[in-house]
Image: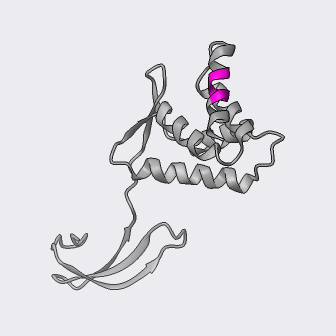
Amino acid sequence: MKCPFCGYQESKVVDSRHSEDNLSIRRRRECLGCQRRFTTYEMVEVLPMVVVKKDGSRQNFDKSKILTGLQRSCVNRPVPVAEMERITNEIEQAVMNTMEREISTDQIGEMVMERLKPLDEVSYIRFASVYRQFKDVNSFMRELTKILEEK
């Protein structure tokens, strides 16, 4: 760490503690050149995840959109909000753990359906009908048939 007073490249950490917001670590350092003390803050660098939409447009990842989609598909169903939040957090973690900086809405939708299907089939069908944009009754029936065959 470069000293802000003399520019010397070496310093030692005298004290470390979490910042008030608990999102960074506050470090008191002492310059090995001029012996003056200064404070630095260390935090995790978070790179933004970009979502590529079906029309090719891009926007920053927003987990609240996943939760909103889950809430809409689970209206009047016995799915606890805690479960919807758990699914949302799992998907956010999976997305952030990928080595890629972009993810498609198709991939996110598949992750949601994969987690929603064992939880509640009706909610799964509701989500799938919007996500997969069924064009007609036959495509909707094919999805229902797949679920019935798996039982």
Residue 39's place in the image compared with 145, above or below, is below
Residue 116 point in image, percent of width and height: 64, 44
Side of 21 relative to 32 (left or right): right
What is the quadrant of the N terminus in the image?
Answer: bottom left
Image colouring = one colour
Residue shown at 37%/57% (left/top)?
A: 45
Residue shown at 43%/50% (left/top)?
A: 96
Q: In this rendered view, identify the residue nearer to me: 36 or 112.
A: 112
What is the quadrant of the C terminus in the image?
Answer: top right
Q: Is residue 28 magenta?
A: no
Residue 15 point in image, percent of width and height: 37, 85
Q: In this rendered view, identify the residue nearer to me: 118 or 45.
A: 118
Q: In this rendered view, identify the residue nearer to me: 118 or 92.
A: 118
Q: Residue 128's quadrant in the figure?
A: top right
Residue 97's place in the image compared with 49, above or below, is below
Side of 28 relative to 36 (left or right): right
Residue 50 point in image, percent of width and height: 43, 37
Q: Which residues are magenta?
A: 141-145
Residue shown at 69%/54% (left/top)?
A: 83
